[in-house]
Image (spheres, grey):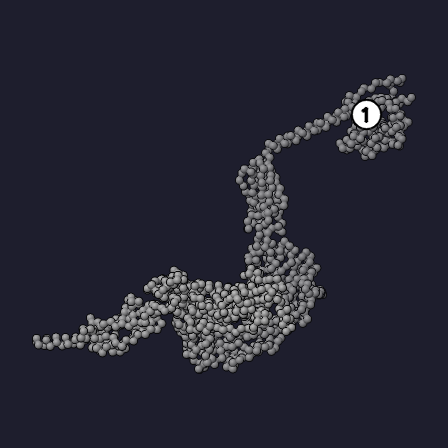
Amino acid sequence: MADRRSGLTGPPEHRRTTPARAVVIAELLHLESSNLLELYRKRETFIANVISGDSRLVSVPPPSSQLDTRDKLWRLQTALLQCRGLMERAIAKEDEELSTEMGEYKTLRKMVSDRLLYLVNTIGEVIKAMDGPALVTPSFNDSLEPDNLTVFEMKLWVFRVFIEVDYWAKTAETVLQALPKERVKPTRLRSTRSSHR
Amino acid sequence: MITWLLLGSLFCNSQQDGDFKDDGVYRCEPQNLAFSTLDNMILLTWQDDPSCMSVHEVLTYELEVLVADKLTHYEEVTIKAGQIGSTHSWNWSSHLPFECASHKVKLRSRSGTHKSQWKQEQTIPAGKTESTRPEVYPRDKVFEVGSRATFCCVLPMDQAFEKLFISGHDSKNWELSNISSQVHVLTVDLNRASTTSCTNIICEAVNDKSRVVDNGACAYIGYRPDDRDLTCETQDFQSIECVWNVGRDTHLARKSPTIYEFLGSRCPEGYNGRCSHKMQKDYGAMSWTLTAQNKLGTVTLVDWADLSHRVHMLAPQEVRVSAVNASDVKLDWEWGVKKYGGLSMKCQLNISDGETYAVVERVGDGLNSVVFNDLIPNWIYMVRIRCGTSQHFWKWSNWSSSVEFHTLGDVPEALDVWMQEKGSQTIITWKVPLANQSHGDIIDYEISWAESSKRQEKERVLHPKHSFALHLNTTKDYVVSIIARNQYGKSSPSTITIPALNTGSPKVKWSRAQGSNGGFNLSWSANPIASCGYIVDWCPRTRSCKIDWLRVPPNKTHVSIFSKNFTEGVRYLLSIHACTQSAPTLLERIEGYVKEKIIQDGLFKILKWKQREMDVEVSWNPVAIQEQSAFIHGYSLYYWDRNSSVAYVSTDNPQATSLTAKNLQVNTYTFTVKAITSVGECGATSINVTLNSMTDNLIKAVGITLVTIFVLLCLIVVLCYRKWECIKLMVYPPIPIPVLKDKWPTPLAKQSSHPVFVEMSHHTEVELMAIPELQCKSEAPSKVFAEQESVSSSSTRESRNHPVEKLMTLPCQSPLLPLSPSLVNNGHLNPSFNATSPNSATGSNGYKPQEKKGYSKEVAEKPLPCALTYILVPALPSE
C-alpha cells in the first residue's frame, strides 16, 4: 500500500490541478475498494464464481472510441455516482440485516463510500472546467433492488456492489490518468478564464 | 345343542363381515387426513372411521415416512379405547429440508391381526429447481451450536455437482452424500457459532458450458439464552430492580435476539442484565420471574424474597463538613428517599489521608450526620460514606462523593528522645517529628539539663537539627528535658535520665543474632525493672555510628526491626535497654548481620610462613570487623604441591592467627587460607612456598661458617702482609749496635739518649711520658686512615682531628735513625716525633704532647694500631 501511495505523489505543480487531484483520488479509491473486496471475500469465503452472469449493477452507455474526453468523464461520473448510491444502500442493508460488530471492515466500507463521493465531485469540477454540463443525476435499475432476498442473496448482492465499485474505481483511475496533458490546468487559471466571460 | 352352535357360528361370521368391506378390506381405517408442514416438521391429523367404534381391542395406527421414496421412519400411534372417535395427530421432524427431497407419509390402522390399507399423503414434489443456479437449503435457518444439521444442494438438470461446503467448519465433521444426481446432502456437526452475521453454505456446480456456477445459503449458528443468577432488590421502596448475569453471547443478536420478559412485561433492555418494575405492594415475600427466549430455547429465572430484606440504599447525597477542629470534624448529608428517614441503618465512613485510610461504622435511625474524633491536627482528609440497612442487611449503597477537609493545627507531640555515649560526650538525640506529629511547622527545640543539686541549664536548637552534645560530669546523674515548639505552642517535655558512669555494673550479656527478611527479630527475657518498656537501639559496628532506636511496650519482649538503612554484610550492634523511672539500664547486647555475605578473596593482607623441620606454620594478622561481611567461625588452610592432592587443616577458633601444615615434602607448595563463615569458606588468600630439607640447612650453615672463616683468614693475611714491616719490627727487632762512649757505662739520668731498646711493658708511665711517640706507616696515607677509621676505634679524638697528611706521610722507618732537620721542617713529620730534638720540644704548630697527660693516658688505654710500641730512643748526640 505504501508503495502504491508513494507512486501517487507527483510533482507539486501536478498536484495543484484538479484533474491531477482526481487521478490521486481515483488511485486511492481503487486501492481501498480492492482492499474492501478482498476483505469481504475472505470473511465470507466467497470465490469469484459466486457471481454469475454478466449483468452489471451500474448501467451507463457503452464505451466508445468516438467519445471525447468530456463525454468519457461524464460517463465515468455517472457510473461512479451510481456506485456511490449502491454503496450507501449496501451499507444500510448490511447494518439492518447483518452483524453490527465489523471493526476494520466497517471503517473501510465507510471510507470507500466517502471517497466515491469525493471523486464524483472532483470529476464534476474537471467537467465544469471543460465547460461541461452540471452534475448528472443517477438512475438505478430498480430490478436490482435487494428486496425479498435471502441473507445469502443479500450477501451476494453486497459482494456484487463491491465488485462494481472496484471495477469503476479502476476505470476511473485509467480514464483520469489518460486525460490529455493540455487539459491539466491549474484551477486558478480556469477560474480566471471563467471570470472573463 | 348343535342348533345353538350353528347359531353362534352364524353370528360370529356376520360380525366379521361387518368389519370388512366387500372386497375384504378392513373397514376401520383413518379418514379426513390433514397434512401440513412447519419448518422441518410434518404435522398429520386424522379421524377414525365410525366402524372403529366396534373395535374392542387396542387400535393402533402405523405411520411410515419415505424420504425420496426410501423408508426413513416408522412409528406406531396407539389409540386407547376412550379416544377412539376423536381426532388424532402426529408430528415428525425431518432431518432434511423439504425442498431437498419428497417426503411421503403413509398411515394405516391395525387391530389385532386386522390391518387397513395404507393411506398416503405426499408433500409437494421436491428435489427439482427451475433456477439456473444451484440452490442450497435450508435458508436463513437458526441452528444451535453442537447440533447436527443437514444441508442440501439442488442442481439444475444441466449442471454437474462439484462441491458443497460450510465456511468456518472443519471438513472432518462433514458427511457428504447424495439423494440423486441432482440433490447432494451435507451433514455437519455444528461446533462453531457464526462469527459474522451468519455462516455460509456454498454449493458449486459446473454447467453444460463447463463453467463453474456457485450459490449458497446462510445459517445462523448460535446458542440458546444463558442468563442466570437473577437477583431483585429495591432502592426506593417504589420499584424493583432486578439484575442477572446474561451469560454467553448467543451469536444470534440479529436473527433471533433474546427477548426478556419480567413479571409478564417486556424488558426492552434486558440484554444489559438489568430490568426494573414498579412495585405492587410494599413488603412481604414475593417471587420474581424472568424469561429469556430466542429461537433456540427459553430460560426461566426465579428469585424469591421479602423485599424488606432486599433494600439496596442509594448513596448519601450532598455530604458536607459542618464543623472542623484540630482533632474532630462533623459531617452532614442528605437522603434522596423520604422513607430512609425512619430506616434503621448503619453507615461506613471511609476516611483517608491519601496514603492510609480507616473505616468507621456508625449505626442509627435515619443517620444523616456523624462526628469524627481522633484526627491528626493540621492534616488533610478525604471522607466518603455509604450506608445499608442495619436489620436484614442486604448490600452497602454506593459510596457517596468524597469530601475533603483540613483539620486545624495544634502543639507538637512529645518527642522521642534517646542518648548515645561518644567518648566523653553524651549525645542527646531525638526523632524529628513526622508531619503527623508536628501538627504545624516546627521552629526549634528547647533542651534543658540539670544535675539534681544544681541549677538547670538550657539551650535552644533550631529545626531540623535533632541532636545535642553534652559534656557532663560522669560521676553524676543528669536529667535532660526536650521540648519541641511550633507556631501553635510547645509540646509536652520529654525527659531522659543520663546515669553516672558506673564501672562496677555487672557484665552485660553479649550474643549474636541472624537477620531475616532484611531485618532482625529480637527477643529477650522480661525484666521487672522495665517499668516503662524497653528501648532497642542499633548502629553498624563498621561505620561512624548514627544511632537509631525503637521503643517496645513493657508487656512485649520481642520485636522485629526493619530499617531502610540496613545493609547486608555489615555487622550491627543492637542493645536492649530497660526503660525505668530513672535512667535506662542496658540489659543485653547483640551482634548480627541483616544478611551475611561472602567475604571477598584476599581477606588476609599479609600471610607469613615459617618452616619448622618439615612443618610450615602460616600466620596472619587478626581480621578487622570492618572486613568481615559475615561472622568468622574459624579458619582453614589448604595446601598442595604440583604432584599431590589438596590437603587441609582448619581451626574452629575465630581468634586463631596461624595454622600449621605438617609432614610436608621438599617441594614448592601453595598455601591458601580461608575464613570459615556460615555462608561458606571465603576470603581466600594464597602464598607459594618452597621448602628446604634439613641437610640443606646443615650444609648451608657449615658453608656459611667456612666462608666466614676463610674471609677472616684472608683479612688477617692481608693485614699481616700490609703490616709486615711493623710485625717484623715487633717480632724480630734489629739489635742495636752498642755505642760506646768514654764514660761507659753512664747513669741513665745523665745520658738520656742512650740507644737502649726496652720492652714497653717494662717501663712506667712516667718513663713513657718521657719518650717520644713513634708512628709508622708503609702505605698511602689516605688509605691507611680509612682503615684506621673503620677497623679500629682506638684512635684518639685528637689524632683524628689532625690533618691526614701529617699523620700518614710518616714513613715507617727505623726509629733509631736520626731524622734530617729538613724533613722535620717541611711538616711531613708528626710534630710529636719532633720531640726527639731537645730544641724543638715545642713544634711549629705549638703541639706539646708531653704537656698533655690525659692524652698519654688515653693512648695507653686505646693504643693506635700502628703504634706498635713505645720505644726509648737514646738522645742523639748534639753535634
Disc 1: which residue: B812
Give percent across and percent down for residue B716.
73, 27
Q: Quadrant of residue B296?
A: bottom left
Residue at left offset 88%, top offset 30%: B843
Q: From where the camera sits, is residue A111 visible?
A: no
Instruction: Find the residue positioned furthest to the right.
Output: B879
Quarter occupied by the C terminus of chain B: top right
Instruction: Find the residue positioned furthest to the front.
Output: A66
Looking at the picture, does residue B380 appear above or below residue B606? below
Q: Quadrant of residue B196?
A: bottom left
Left or right of B821 in this view: B290: left
Q: From where the camera sits, is residue B479 visible?
A: yes
Q: Quadrant of residue B360?
A: bottom right
Give B67 or A104, whichever is nearer the viewer. B67
Give B685 or B853, whichever is nearer the viewer. B685
Give percent across and percent down for residue B11.
13, 77
Q: Mark 1 Cα within 10 Å, few/some/many (few <14, many 20+)? A: some
Give percent across and percent down for residue B504.
64, 56
Quarter occupied by the N terminus of chain B: bottom left
Count up the numbered dots: 1
**Residue kind at label 1, given as amino acid type:** Cys
Tell me the SS state at disc 1. Answer: loop
Q: Chain of mark 1?
A: B
Residue at left offset 53%, top offset 40%: B645
Looking at the picture, does residue B773 appear above or below residue B342? above
Residue at left offset 42%, top offset 68%: A152
Give B603 or B396, whichever is nearer the viewer. B396
Give percent across and percent down for residue B168.
42, 63
Give B563 or B724, whichever is nearer the viewer. B563
Residue at left offset 22%, top offset 78%: B50
